[in-house]
Image (cartoon, grey):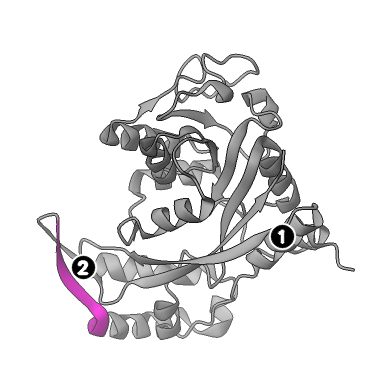
Amino acid sequence: MINLAEEWRRLDGRRRKPDSQDHWDERAKSFSFKDAPDTYLRSFISKAGITGKETVLDMGCGTGSLAVALAAMGCSVVAADFSKGMLDRLHSKAAERGVLLERGTSGFGSDDFPAGDFETCPSEVQAGKILPLHMSWEDDWANYGLGKGSVDVAVASRSVITHDLEDSLKKLSAVARERACVTVCTGVSPRVDARVARAMGLELERHNDALFVFGIVSDLGYEPTVSYIHSPRTKSYISPDEAYYSLLRTRDYLADAADQISVEESACRLRGFLADHLVKIDEDGAKRWTLDQPRVVPWAFISWDVGI
């Protein structure tokens, strides 16, 4: 019988290296893709069975779209991410929605998080508020006040794919009293548009992350269920040139791009594709450019009851 946790770790060396904290800090400044209005968030919250009365851990919270939405519903939210830049964006997004933040340490955004130095523990977050934590998957979560059964529901929205997937799923399960929920990509990388890649003459590998998550959760003794979220996503550009150079970076996500087709040929194909499919739009009073069809990103929503 295949040990899926070990197989995941073995295959991890072949995958594209995960982006660093510095990368995500920088990316937070221009994190600009748009899912269709609330489609993904509404689907995630509905499938998670969250009603607004729960204490929720949002692990790998990014800029806080889910955390802020949950707090606005009345949930007590612990929002954790290893990128200070993302937490800064969460701070701004919460302010825009009128959602208050708890003070989790001696100062929001501090790089120093010693155990026990909390003004508010995760278990004490008030309803409708967010406690931000500068915490990674690899950290000892107990040092941040997240012990066994600390929250009702633990979620990882598009953020659970780590080097040690088994350890991450164990941690998520351990802190939840009721259930854990994750989403993982089921198609090609969510970073790229498959239609653009094909137009450039590139073949993309499909992800099988959901199979590993489902199998490892099952091996841990839980009974996972799976459903799907299909999230339309658009991105706009200030000019045709910005669109061209941004989409040309599709090659960067393929280790064997040079073996498939030359840079010159794929660039020429991209120019032709954009001539046919790049359209001008009005976005908040400004002229922008976007592709004529949104791309649809499929996500597997996997959840399991922990039964504490």
Q: Secondary structure at mark 2?
A: strand
Where's the N terminus, which quadrant? bottom right
Dominant secondary structure of the residues highlighted in magenta in the image = strand
Instruction: Please tell me which residue is depicted at 38% across the width and 42% down the height of the picture.
Output: 69
Q: Which residues are magenta?
A: 275-283
Q: Nearest the camera: 47 or 163?
A: 47
Q: Earlier in the sequence, mark 1 or mark 2?
A: 1
Instruction: Please tell me which residue is depicted at 45% across the width and 23% down the height of the picture.
Output: 126
Q: Marks 1 and 2, how far apart in space? A: 37 Å
Side of 288 where 114 appears, left or right: right
Residue 302: quarter of image: bottom right
Q: Nearest the camera: 130 or 297?
A: 130
Residue 27 drawn at (x, y percent): 41, 48
Residue 237: quarter of image: bottom left
Instruction: Please tell me which residue is depicted at 49% across the width and 45% down the height of the picture.
Output: 50
Residue 191 drawn at (x, y percent): 46, 64
Q: Residues within 10 Å of mark 1 (few under 14, many from 20)?
A: some
Residue 266: quarter of image: bottom left
Where's the C terminus, which quadrant? top right
Q: Is residue 13 visible?
A: no
Side of 236 where 284 appears, left or right: left
Instruction: Please tell me which residue is depicted at 45% across the width and 35% down the height of the picture.
Output: 75
Above or below for 167 versus 272: above
Side of 104 where 152 appears, left or right: right
Q: Magenta stretch containing residue 208, yes or no?
A: no
Q: Is residue 213 visible?
A: yes
> Which residue is disc 2 drawn over?
289
